[in-house]
Image: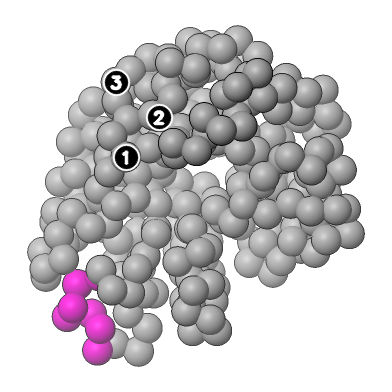
Amino acid sequence: MDLDQLEKNIISKKTFLCLGLDTDLNKIPKHLLNSEDPVFDFNKSLVDRLSSKIVSVKINTAFYEVRGKDGWSSLEKSIHYIKTNHPHLFTIADAKRADIGNTSSMYAKAFFEKMNFDSITLSPYMGQDSVTEFLKYENKYAILLALTSNEGSNDFQIPNELYLDVVSKSQCWDNSSKIMYVVGATKSDYLKKIRNIAKDNFLLIPGIGAQGGDFEQTIANSTLSSKRILINISRAIIYASNDKNYLDSAEKVVNEFNLRSL
């Protein structure tokens, strides 16, 4: 998907929301467990219900890889369904890959060609050559971990402002317009510094909801020069209820966030 179109979708839908499908077989409504693929059915139902009220879907691959081939099958079916039936949704493989060049090339082929995701999260700490392969694809995007929402970000990312090195140096790489950045909502005080460097890049912002990030403050600090943000919310939406009314509960949460968005 072209990023200009994604920005238009944000404006027309009046939402920054990215639906995080961190789907855990042990947490989905029990009435779905008798189906052939409960995880896929759960994902499908959520996307079908919420597609008009979100602009993006992020699939965290760890929740699928843990189930081996069955989980990988659910992942492939989910992304194929979304791309086929909801092509207006920007898709993110939350896989946190990146390695030496020839390995990154294989990761890029897997997620961009085989599964047709629009973007993938990457750990940038092996440097430019670990990201380059992902930036060669038209209308495909690399989302670099800049400042994450977990407590451990204080170990390496914040001391000496390493997160600013990631953002500033990557701005000089070829095809840097295809780079997006992960910035946790629990670190919203740092968003202004990041926006001063990455004035027009998309920011993927997790940490709202279950992790306690402040929604309004995050929007205010991240939209100083651009409205190019995606606010990912996972557990607060998908597990709003584990009863048969789970879709109604999920939609209620989405509606509440959207009323506070734009």
CB atoms at circles 1 and 3 under 8 Å apart? no
Q: CA distance from mark 1 to mark 3?
A: 15 Å
Point 67% across, 61% down: residue? 111
Q: CA distance from mark 2 to mark 3?
A: 10 Å
The residue identified by callout 2 is: 185
> Residue 254's x, y, as percent?
24, 43
> Residue 109 vs residue 148: left or right?
right
Residue situated in front as seen by the camera: 188 or 32: 188
> Residue 35's x, y, as percent?
29, 87
Point 39% across, 58% down: residue? 21
- Nearer the viewer's eye, disc 1 or disc 3? 1
> Residue 75 vs residue 217: left or right?
right
- Amino acid type, residue under disc 1 in the picture: Gln
Please tell me the numbered disc located at residue 211: 1
Q: Magenta part of the protein: which range?
A: 28-34
Q: CA distance from mark 1 to mark 2?
A: 9 Å
Which is nearer the N-term, disc 1 or disc 3?
1
Q: How many neighbours does mark 3 have within 10 angstroms: few (below 14), some (14-19), or many (20 or more)?
A: few
